Image (cartoon, rainbow, N blue to C red):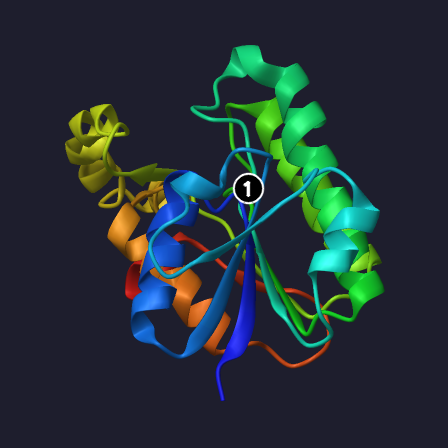
Amino acid sequence: MNFRVVITGATGYLGRALGGQLAEAGRYNVVGLVRPGGSRRVPRGVSAVELDVFDCGQLAAAIRAGDTVVHLIGTPHPNPGKAVEFKRVDLASVRACATAAARAGAGHFVYVSVAQPAPVMQAYVEARRAGEESIAAAGLTATILRPWYVLGPGHRWPYLLLPFYALAELVPGVRATARRLGMVTLAQMTRALARAVAEPPPPGPPHIVDVPMIRAA
C-alpha cells in the first residue's frame, strides 16, 4: 500500500525534482502543499492542496497521522542581503510546519537545513539552525539534510569554484571544512531526499545528513 508524502515547497527548485521522482517511483501518494494558484506548477503525479503555508491550522488539516512531511519552503537564491526574508519565510514556515506535523501525528519530518558552522551567510545559517531547533522541540522523528550549495539549472556559477574545493580537500588543515561546505548536485540532493523518505530514522534526536552523506546517497 502506498503511503503519503506531503511536500511543502512542491513547486520550487528541490520540490519539483523530488515530487516528480517520488511520483514516478509509484510507491508513494505524493501531496504538494502549495500557495493559492500554485497547483498548476506541481509535477505530474503530485496532488496539490492550496493553502496558507504559514497557517498551522490549515497545515495540520492537510497532514494525516503517519505521513512523511518534507519541508522545502525557503527564500529563492539566498544571499546576505535577504536576512529579513530568512526570518519571515524560512524560519516562520518551518516553525508552522513542525508544529502542524506534531499536531497531526506525522510519522517523519524531513527538513533541508544548511551546512554549519560556516564563515559566511550568517543570517541564513542562523535561521536554518533555529528551524532545526523547532523540529527537535516539537518532538518529531526527523531527518535533517545539511547541504551548502545545490548545483543545477539556474544555479551553475559555483561550478567555477570546484577546482578550489578540490585543492582545499588536499590540505589537512582545511579538509574537513571544505568537505562540510562542499557543493552537491541537484541529482545528488534529490536522491538523498528520496532516501530519507524511504528510510526514516528511529525515534530520538534528529538524524543529520551532511554533505559527504548527501554525495554518497
- Horizontal side of 85 relative to 7 (left or right) equals right
Q: Residue furthest top?
A: 81
Question: Residue 71: where, in percent of width, then height?
Answer: 58, 50
Residue 201: quarter of image: bottom right
- Relative to the observer, which residue lies in front, 58 or 148? 58
- Relative to the observer, which residue lies in front, 53 or 72? 53
Image quarter hosting the C terminus: bottom left
The residue tagged 1 is 116
Question: Residue 173: where, in percent of width, then height?
Answer: 37, 41
Q: Is residue 97 in sight in this rendering?
A: yes
Q: How many numbered discs, if any?
A: 1
Task: Answer above or below: position of 160 versus 26.
Answer: above
- Relative to the observer, which residue lies in front, 86 or 115? 86
How packed is label 1: few (under 14 Cα within 10 Å), some, or many (20 or more)? Answer: some
What residue is shown at x 33% (from left), y 55% (from top)?
44
Q: Amino acid at mark 1?
A: Gln
- Horizontal side of 121 relative to 44 (left or right) equals right
- Horizontal side of 186 relative to 84 (left or right) equals left
Question: Residue 40: where, in percent of width, then height?
Answer: 42, 40
Residue 155: quarter of image: top left
Task: Answer above or below: position of 179 versus 92.
Answer: below
Residue 167: quarter of image: top left
What residue is shown at x 64% (from left), y 71% (from top)?
67
Q: Is residue 213 in sight in this rendering?
A: no
What residue is shown at x 31% (from left), y 73% (from top)?
25
What residue is shown at x 48% (from left), y 18% (from top)?
79
- Relative to the observer, which residue lies in front, 173 or 207? 207
Could you tell me which secondary element the residue under label 1 belongs to?
loop
